[in-house]
């Protein structure tokens, strides 16, 4: 049903994005030391990796997010919002994704989950 107008999805997305950015601001990232080829590298952003927020594509929210270009088809079904910000810092991406997903869940969006992977 059309319980929610599109503008509500837009404000939910904006709230989730703000929650994600605040989570990253609060984060204390543990820099990573990498030793290779007799050199020591300090990676300021910590471990490198990826994160995404997944949700069903057959919901009003999912259809809206795809139409707006926020989300794309996910491997294995549904949609995914790829966290492209924060360089290669997995800690920052995961902090953003978790806060983003939690905000959506609090707004009643169902089937939301976070996926992350070290590079």
Image (cartoon, rainbow, N blue to C red):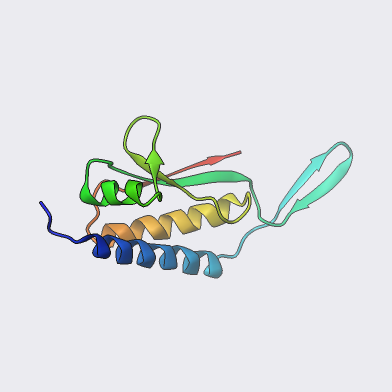
The answer to whether 76 is drawn above or below residue 42 in the figure is above
Question: Which residue: 36% across, 67% down?
Answer: 15
- Based on the displayed image, in which of its 4 quarters is residue 37 positioned? top right
Q: Is residue 6 left or right of residue 48?
A: left
User: Residue farthest to the left?
Assistant: 1
Q: Is residue 82 left or right of residue 55?
A: right
Q: Is residue 74 left or right of residue 4?
A: right
Q: Quadrant of the C terminus?
A: top right
Query: Which of the pair 94/72 is nearer the observer?
Result: 72
Give how far across and how far down residue 9 sits, in percent: 28, 60
Question: Which residue: 45% across, 62% down?
Answer: 20
The answer to whether 11 is drawn above or below residue 52 in the figure is below
Give how far across and how far down residue 14 sits, in percent: 38, 65
Number of numbered discs: 0
Question: Which residue: 28% across, 47% down?
Answer: 62
- Based on the displayed image, in which of its 4 quarters is residue 29 positioned? bottom right
Query: Which of the pair 48/28 is nearer the observer?
Result: 48
Give how far across and how far down residue 2 sits, in percent: 12, 55
User: Residue farthest to the right?
Assistant: 38
Give how far across and how far down residue 85 sits, in percent: 56, 55
């Amino acid at each position: 049903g059309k319980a929610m107008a599109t503008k509500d999805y837009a404000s939910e997305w904006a709230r989730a994005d703000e929650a994600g950015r605040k989570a990253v601001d609060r984060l204390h990232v543990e820099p990573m030391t990498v030793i290779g080829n007799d050199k020591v590298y300090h990676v300021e952003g910590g471990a490198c990796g990826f994160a995404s927020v997944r949700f069903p594509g057959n919901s009003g929210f999912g259809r809206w997010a795809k139409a707006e270009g926020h989300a794309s088809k996910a491997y294995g079904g549904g949609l995914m919002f790829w966290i492209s910000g924060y360089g290669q810092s997995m800690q920052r991406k995961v902090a953003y994704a978790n806060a983003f997903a939690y905000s959506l869940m609090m707004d009643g969006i169902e089937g939301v989950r976070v996926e992350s992977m070290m590079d």
